[in-house]
Image: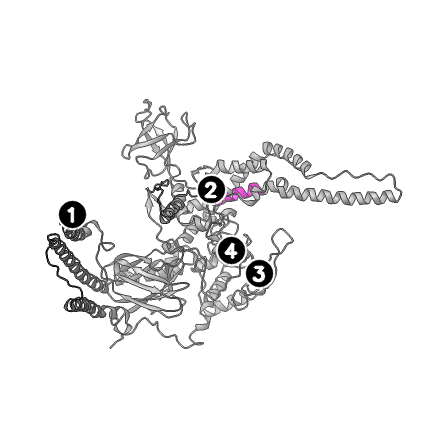
Amino acid sequence: MGRFWAIFFILAAVVTVGFSAIGPEFRWWFPGDGLAHSTLGKKIDDLFYLILIIVSVTYVGTHIVLGYVLWRGAGIQKSDKVWFSHGSHALEVIWTIVPSGILLFIAFYQMDVWRNYRVKAYFPKKTAAVAEVTARQFEWRIRYPAPGKILQPRPQPDDIYTVNDIRVPAGQPVSISLRSDDVQHAIFVPGLRVKQDAVPGLVIPVWFEVTDTGTYDMVCAELCGWGHYKMKAQVVASSEEEFEAWKVNAAKEQSYDGVPQTPEAVAAKADDE
Amino acid sequence: MLRCKMTLPHWSSFLGGLFVLVLASGCSKNPEAQFAWRDSTLELLPKAQDAVQQSITEGFGTPHDLVAWDKLPVDFGGVQGVVQPAVEGAKLSATEFQVQWDGTEDGIGAGSELLWMTGALAKSKTPTATVISYQPETKTLRLKTKNDAPAQGDRLAVGLGHQLQLGRMVYMKNCNHCHGVAGDGNGPTAQYLNPRPRDYRLGLFKFTSTLSSEKATREDLQRIVKYGIPGTYMPSFLLLDSKHNNFHETTAVVEYVRWLAMRGEMEKRLVDELSADYSQTALADEAEKEKKSYAEAKSEYDKARKAGNKEAAKPESAKSLTQLKKAAGEELAKYLEVDYPGTLNDTADFIADAWKRADDPASRIVPTVTRVADDAASRERGRLLYMSDKTKCYTCHGAKARGNGPAVEDFWKKPGSNETYAKRGLHDTWGNPLPPRDLTRGQYRGGRRPIDIFSRVYAGIKGTPMPAFGGTVLKDNDIWDIVNYVMSLPYEEQSPSAKPAAAPHMAATEPVGQ
């Protein structure tokens, strides 16, 4: 076999790096266009890339060392003296301290993002609660306050309801109150890098700031029963004006009384006001 | 592809054996989808059963082989047209000709199947040609076919049934496991659900925008598919909307459900027609009755003889079940020959008309007045009506509208019999227990728009004890008062005077962390 395994392991590293390099071209990468469309999502991606770099360097380095050792080993004659490394105190210290250092660095470095995402006191200022999202087997029911009002913990007569369709204004931090009607669910919007369990009995605030208007897929990320796969929904982020206009329109549709709006009736109403 | 047959070397370990087991169970053929028959169909005498099953299969086919019965008001998909020569009187080609279409010919493309509806070529009931290409500018079809040339004015259909086929695909993927292949509400997951999934086979749907005697409109069913039914296991399929060859999934699945409902109702009506005279149970009952009356007559006769009355007539012996069956069989043969074709035709017409009528604007509930202003006075009028003997709302929904009126404590009789239900409380037409709605929960199965609640009061809820009040008992403005009262119920306890203002939502609405 000679130096076959040395070449094999070096090649393995080269092939892996090669595939990773062309991967995004074939969309073997993050969902959608591969970019995070929320402010926090961008930071989460940065963390991901940092870890990816650390892991890549370690992976490639390990393979180079492995290849080198195998290459050298293949040339060793039976008569050569062996270097016996087992029990080397210095080596043990090095390979304990270096990985611990890396792990500690990651642990401390990510804290900032975690705190901003999860600790309420560090939520961005002026985060408006846009909606209450209630997960149930197997759909998402959403309750918005009426135009110009703020969300109350209990349903109000003028609340607006949708199902499987979350509307938010883009370009500003917003939060949703996440609840569950039955079992544990999890809200997951891959395009925004938002993921949070919905736990029965708890109201969990989830904040995010969508940077680009558009429609983002939303699914349930906690196996919640046989219809888990049916919990497909969407998050529609639009400009603030569009969002408010949508709300006004949705409120109007929800108060529809079934009487056809003839042009005369509309005109008469306009005269009254 | 997995190969199902796999020979392992003899040294195959236990693990290897397990592997084969797993493969074999993975490969076992799924049971073939088929429309289950009603229990009452299977109760019929064999000849009657055959007749019903044959006519239903002829009109509707099987899940693998759908039939587009043109009598039914179902949009099966596809477009019809007539052959039109390019030049008047020119000879037509078998493989290329122009067509005058009835509607828009959007869905036509390579691979669409063509069926001849009239003319010399309309012998087969299945498509006999395939479209190679279509030119919308000249309206010219190029075909692959073994047929002869058509004649001018021959009617043809392209892509017939495509919408129904798409509907079936969507239904099998999303609906089948609760609602069942035949729409009988008896799929494999149905047994775990309360309330039970709808059984379409009565042709009844609860939440409609039509008058109490009418069926559901396409739009009603679409709303249910899109928005689901809160408080039940029917989820929302809002995003089920991809397009296949110009057919929308939601539209297609609604057509399929309507079609299943027509199929089920057709079967039920035919069986109901036959089961009084030609079912196993009816005949067994008859034999039992004969036996009983004979025993009575016999004891009378014996008594008379004992008393010395020699003129008493000896009663005829009771007819046995076999004799009765034979007689019924003869009668049935005559019936099937003489009356059944007419019955079949009338039943199909009746169902088709009912579904056609549902989409007629005249069947729709349109309030004659706009919603009465939702103020305290209107709600109070509504409350008084709710508690009045005119509506008797409180008997079921309860004085506090918690769905616990006195009616839920009673044992109710099954319709058309003297038996009572085994459980207390109200039941729906399908025989399932049905508690009256708790109106204080703010959960509205048929929708929360004022018109939805208005429709529930106006036309009742079909297939349930909720009666229709519109037109007869209540005027439209009375109904609006009730709607205003009912819609205020969930918020009664938290009106500002009764309770301190609720704290704003916990999701930071105010600047925090300053």
Check disc 1 and report the residue beneath it: A1
Whole-number angstrom distance, CA of label 1 to CA of label 2: 61 Å
Which of the two discs, 1 and 2, sits closer to the camera?
1
Q: Earlier in the sequence, mark 4 or mark 3?
A: 3
Label 1 secondary element: loop
Q: Nearer the viewer, mark 4 or mark 1?
A: 1
Q: What amino acid type is highlighted by mark number 2?
A: Gln
> Above or below — where is B98 with respect to A58?
above
Q: Is residue A261 visible?
A: no
Compute the Cα span from label 4 to label 3.
Answer: 17 Å
Image disc number at residue B461: 4
- Kindly report the secondary structure that dominates the magenta region of the rendered protein: helix
Left or right: residue A82 compared with residue B234: left
- Residue B176: say if magenta: no
Q: Which residue is mark 2?
A: B34
Mark pair 4, 1: CA separation: 81 Å
State which quadrant residue A70 falls in: bottom left
Query: Would you identify the image quadrant in which residue B75 lies?
Result: top left
Q: Which residues are magenta?
A: B259-271
Chain that bears disc 4 = B
* Contact between labelled residues 1 and 4, with CB atoms less than 8 Å apart: no
For mark 3, what is the residue?
B425
